[in-house]
Amino acid sequence: MTRGPTLPAHRLPYLPTPLDAFNTARADEARTLLLHCLHSVRWAHRMADHRPYPDLGALLAAADEAAYDLSPADLAEALADESLPELPEGTYSAAHMALGAAHAAYEARFGHAFVIYLGDVPPDEVIDHILEAIRSRLANDPEEERVVAAEEVRRLARGRLVVLLRGAGSCANSANNPAPGK
């Protein structure tokens, strides 16, 4: 018994990736998305203006470079729109009170929200990690803390971009958004 002719392999139509969609979005749409990742107009403009990015690695490298170039005013703008990390469900009210008190002390000392990247912290360790970091960073002088906060903002933007470009929605819904810090 012989079989008929072999059919050519089925080719799937090209489906755009989230990076393709970002690269081809209107500039104002791209900037709006980027502002959810890092609340700096200058950073968002710079990132949108340098499109297209050939791959996620190139985009993340550009995001890091743009974040390293933030002026003190740009950093202040970015920090102004961050929020206090949300705690995992079931966190005791005492933990909420401890976090609120530590955050209030931090804001009083440095004049801006506490920011921390928690993308690699297991959910059951979030509250301890945040409280330990706030207590530790309260000992920083203002310039030293500005450098640390700038690094945390850069890490937050990077994590939010990864979530955005993996098709998970806007940066505001990133896995770290519960933990950006304000």
Image (tube, helix red, strand yellow):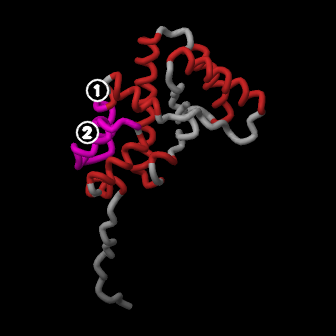
Q: Which residues are magenta?
A: 39-66
Per the model, the C-alpha gap separating discs 2 and 1 is 10 Å
Residue drawn where x is 77% and y is 32% of the image: 93
Label 2 crowd (10 A; few <14 / some 14-19 / many >=20) = some
Q: Which mark is residue 46?
A: 2
The three-letter amino acid code for the residue at tag 1 is Asp
Judged left or right of residue 121, residue 9 is left
Residue 106 found in image quarter: top right
Specify whether residue 135 is painted magenta: no
Q: Answer whether labels 2 and 1 touch (C-beta < 8 Å).
A: yes
Residue at the spot of label 1: 69
Judged left or right of residue 63, residue 99 is right
Quarter of the image for the N terminus: give it.
bottom left
Q: Is residue 8 above or below residue 171?
A: below
Q: Position of residue 17 (x, y in %)?
A: 35, 58
- SS class, disc 2: helix
The three-letter amino acid code for the residue at tag 2 is Arg
Specify whether residue 58 is painted magenta: yes
Label 1 crowd (10 A; few <14 / some 14-19 / many >=20) = some
Judged left or right of residue 141, residue 165 is left
Q: Is residue 36 above or below residue 76?
A: below
Q: Position of residue 54 (x, y in %)?
A: 24, 48
Quarter of the image for the C terminus: give it.
top right
Q: Is residue 120 above or below residue 13?
A: above
Q: How many marks?
A: 2
Judged left or right of residue 134, residue 95 is right
Residue drawn where x is 45% and y is 22% of the image: 149
Residue drawn where x is 50% and y is 10% of the image: 140
Between 138 and 176, the residue placed more toward the observer is: 138
Chief SS of the magenta region: helix
